[in-house]
Image: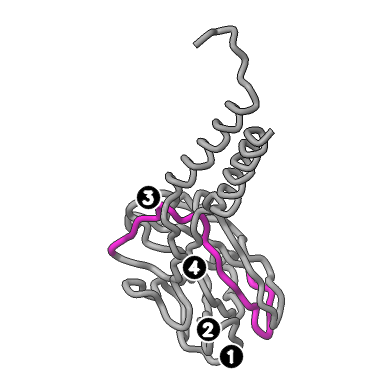
Amino acid sequence: MDKNMKPTPTTKVFSLIGVALALLAAAPTARANLLLYDETLAPGFYANGWNNTYDLANPSPVYSGSVSWKIDLTPWGGLGPISFSGMNTTGYDSLSFWINGGAAGNQDLNLTGVRGGQVVSGLWHFVKDPGANTWVHYTVPLSALLVANVSDFNGVRFTDGSFGVNSQPTFYVDRIELTTVPEPSTAALMGLAAVGALFLGRRRAS
């Protein structure tokens, strides 16, 4: 190819179409979100912690479905969905959950990530007074919990943010899930290729 040759609009469009088609071919099959708790714990996950009482089938308040997870933490308490066998988090991006502060509100809760049987991260005071009788949505990247793209993810725990000073008022959690990595929009990529093809058709017609 002549080094002095400049790309024409046609070659640019061919390149654009090629990139779009390559991205479509390489796009992975969509992976569904993984529910850790919704009505019940996911298979292989258990309510695991210490200094707590809980009810996995609490009838009210509820964010979705018919029950929620009611949790009481005494000083130094902790509780969360834990898998003892571990799982691979590749393809998942964030942890999402809904929390209700109950009649009292004013909770102070840490959120910890667990992998390989060990607590590997702590987001101190991550839930700070979510409000009374109100459902609040939280999303946290798995990278912030140091459990992104690992093969030995065990789960997460909510722990006493007062570090032993106080019990935490009763709170409720619902729809805890791992959300997937956003993928390239198939519709957008197909549209890009279609625009390029239309441009070529017009040039040929002229």
Marks 1 and 3, the one that precedes in the sequence: 1
| Callout 1 touching callout 2 (CB < 8 Å) | yes
User: Which of 108 and 13 lies nearest the eye of the viewer?
Assistant: 13
Q: Is residue 66 magenta?
A: no
Give the Cα distance between marks 3 and 4. 17 Å
Q: Residues within 10 Å of mark 2 (few under 14, many from 20)?
A: many
Query: Dot 1: few (<14), some (14–19), or many (≥20) neighbours within 10 Å?
Result: few
Reply above or below: 113 against 101: above
Looking at the image, residue 56 lies above or below residue 75: below
Cα–Cα span, label 1 and label 2? 7 Å
Residue at mark 4: 177
Q: Amino acid type of disc 3?
A: Val
- Find numbered disc 1 in the image and state the secondary structure of the residue it sits on: loop
Q: Which mark is residue 150?
A: 3
Q: Quick check: 125 above or below 70?
A: above
Amino acid type of the residue tagged 4 in the rendering? Glu
Please name the residue that numbered disc 1 is placed on.
60
Q: Nearer the viewer, residue 119 or 168?
A: 119
Going from N to C along the chain, the mark reached first, 1 or 2, is 1
Q: Is residue 84 left or right of residue 172?
A: left
Mark 2 residue type: Ser
**What element does badge 4 sit on?**
strand
- Disc 4 versus disc 2: distance between alpha carbons? 14 Å
